[in-house]
Image (cartoon, grey):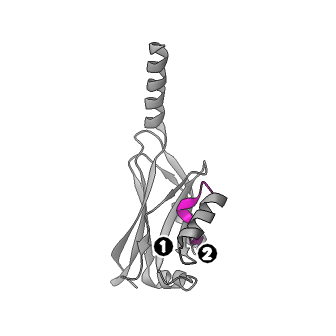
Amino acid sequence: MIISCVAMYIAYLSYSKTNAKHKVEIVTATITENGETKNGIVISVKNSSPTTTMHLTSLAILHRYKERTPIGKIKYVLKYYRQYYSYGFATSSYCHKKSKDLQKPLESYKSHELFISNDELEEIMKHCHSKDKQIRASVQDQLWRNSYSNIFDCKEIL
């Protein structure tokens, strides 16, 4: 019995070290291209797995489409019990234009960054029907595993 428990623990440790783990972050940024300074955000996708290469397939930018209510969240969780973290968010059509930049292998301990200017953010926010000017980024790999960033408030930069 003890040997089987130890074997299961070793199998768990080996799986957890080889399983691809990716993290998505949104931060404000300023870049200079051809002498012109642009303000905006950077979406950073990081592979924190020590051994596994990730193959990214898509990037989605989500924006708020309706106000959040406690009863609405409970209904949403009961209907989509595995997708509670996307309550109140809708996918922007902008995500398909830039996601081709990320469709390449992501080696272990490497990252990809995608810059989105304030003008492009304002275009995304035109479809936002909520008072909260909030966005999230979602990245999907080839095994359909999604990672979501924290909620980013765009009021301060727009």
**Left or right of 64, for residue 46:** left
Which of the labelled discs sits on residue 135, or is there none? 1
Where in the figure is residue 6, as x and y percent of width and height? 44, 19
- Residue found at x 43% / y 64%: 150
Which of the labelled discs sits on residue 93, or is there none? 2
**Relative to residue 132, is residue 47 depicted above or below?**
above
**Relative to residue 73, is residue 127 depicted above or below?**
below
**Left or right of 104, for residue 41:** left
Residue 10: image quadrant is top left
- Numbered range of the magenta stretch: 80-91
- Residue found at x 55% / y 64%: 86
The mark nearer the N terminus, 1 or 2, is: 2
Q: Amino acid at mark 1?
A: Ile
Q: Secondary structure at mark 2?
A: loop
Tally of numbered tags:
2
Which of the labelled discs sits on residue 44, or is there none? none
Where in the figure is residue 94, as x and y percent of width and height? 57, 75
Where in the figure is residue 60, as x and y percent of width and height? 56, 66
